[in-house]
Amino acid sequence: MTPPGPRPATPLPRRRLLAAAGAAGAGALAPGCAGARPGGLRFLSLAWQRESVRANKELVAQWNRANPRARVTYVQGSWASVHDQLLTSFEGGEAPDVIHDASDDLADFAYGGYLADLGGLLPDRLRREIPSHSWRTTTFDGRVYGVPFLQEPRMIMANRRLLAAAGVRLPTARRPWSWEEFGTVARRLTRGGTHGVAWPLKEPVSATLNLALSTGGRLFHRGADGRVTIRYTARDHHVPRAIRDQVVRAESASRTTLGMSGADALPGFFDGRYAMVPLGFSYRQQIVQQAPRDFDWVALPAPAGPGGDRRQGVSPQTLSIAADCRHKARAMAFVDFLLRPPAMVRLALGDWLLPTGTTALADPALRTTRHGWATGSALATSLRPAPAQSVRGYPEWKDKVATPAFQEYYSGAIGDRELRERLVSDGNLVLARYQR
C-alpha cells in the first residue's frame, strides 16, 4: 500500500538542517547500491554528523570482523529524502535489510506491509532495556515495527546573563517553570532591543502537539471501533494560547521568528536579540560550535503543565527490518549489537540526543552538567509517544490543515474559534478518508 500524502515533518531539527545536503545521499537506495554479498545485510544509516557517522561505521566494522559470514554493508542515507527513497526501494524490491528512520515515519510503512513485525525476534535484553512507553512509539495494532533508540526532548536555550540581570529564577528538572511563569519571565526579559523569547515555528505542528502533552492535550482520540477523530479541548488549547499571547498580546516573543527554523534563530540568540529560544535538545551542539566564545548559555527544561506535569511527546529514531529481508534473525542480531549500552551511549553522544535504554541513560557521560546533559537526561522519564504517532492521514492533515492554521493563529491572523474549527472540522474530513 502506498503511503498517501506527503511525509510529515519530523520534530528532529537535524533533518531540516540537511535539506540542502540531502542530494548527497539521493542515490543511496538505488538498486545499483545493493552491494551486500549473499547472506550479508545492507544497513541504511541516516547518521550525518561526523562523530555519529564515524561511530556507526566503526560499529559496522566491529560486527564484520566478528561475523565474516554475515557481513553488513553500510549504506548512507539522508533525513531530507528518506521517506521517498524508502518508498521507492520497497516498491522496487530493493529495500535495505536494516533501516534507520524515525517512529513518526513508520505507521504507513508498517500498515502497508513493508516492515517486519519484530515481536518474535526481539531479544529479552533489548525488551527490558527500553521502557514500555518508548516501545509504544513503534507499536501499531499490537505489532512492533521498530526499535526506538534515540530521542529528543524540547528544551529552552537561554542567555544566562540576561536571566541573571532580570533576577529570574532558573528552573530545574525537578522544579520547572509553569507555562504562566514562563510567560511572566518572557515579559521581564523583554527590554530595549531584546525579546524575552523567540519561537522558531516554521514547522509548528509537532512542536505544538508535543508540548501540549504537559497540559493534558491529546487532540487525537481513538474510539472503541479503532477510528481516530480530532477533539480540540481547553487542554489542547492551553499551549497554543500561551504562545500566541506572547507574540500578539504581550509582544514578549518575536513575531519575525515564527517563520524561521531553529538554526535561523540562533544568530539572533547569540546577538542578544532573544533571551530564550525553545529548541530540540540536539541544538546544543550548534550552540557550542557556533556561539561566540564568551556567550554564556544554559539549557533549561520546557515549561510544565498543571501539577508540574513535564510530559512531552517525542518521535524517537528507530531501527527496523524490511519485511522482504531474507535473514531477519541475523538482522535482529545486528540491531542488538548496535544497541548494546556502550554503543547506544556512543550513538547518543554523536548525535547529541538521549538514548532510550535505561542502562545507557545512566552512563556518567550523559549525566554531566556540561552543556545541559544532566538536565536533558532528567527529563527522559517524562517523554511519551507523540500524539499523532500512529494516526493514519496525519501527514495530509498536518500539511494541508494544521500547519497553515497554526501559522495564521500564532501570527494573529485568526482567532481561537477559527483555529478550532479548522483543526477539527477540516481535520476530521481528512482523517475519515483513511479509515473507511
Image: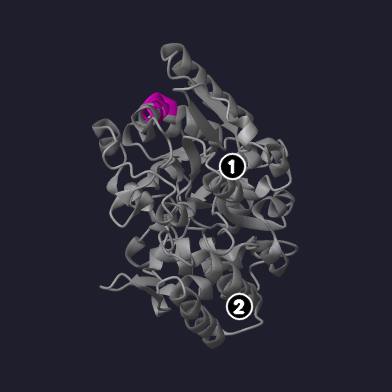
Q: Is residue 134 above or below residue 62?
A: below
Residue 327 tag number: none
Q: Position of residue 314 (x, y in %)?
A: 44, 53
Q: Residue at x 68, y 50 (%)?
A: 263
Q: Is residue 170 above or below residue 426?
A: above
Mark nearer the viewer, 1 or 2: 2
Query: Label 2 amino acid?
Result: Tyr
- Asked if residue 338 is among those painted magenta in the image, a careful observer would answer yes
Residue that badge 1 annotates: 284
What secondary structure is the stretch in magenta mostly built from?
Answer: helix
Quarter of the figure with residue 248: bottom right
Separation of marks 1 and 2 at Cα, in angstroms: 29 Å
- Residue at the farthest bottom position: 417
- Asked if residue 155 is among those painted magenta in the image, a careful observer would answer no
The one nearer the camera, 193 or 166, is 193
Highlighted range, magenta: 334-343
Q: Position of residue 261 (x, y in %)?
A: 67, 56
Residue 174 visible in image:
no
Which of the two labelled residues, at mark 1 and mark 2, occupies the earlier sequence position?
Answer: 1
Q: Position of residue 245 (x, y in %)?
A: 57, 76
Looking at the figure, which quarter contains the C terminus? bottom left
Q: Residue at x 63, y 73 (%)?
A: 404
Residue that badge 2 annotates: 409
Residue 195 visible in image:
yes
Q: Residue at x 32, y 36 (%)?
A: 358
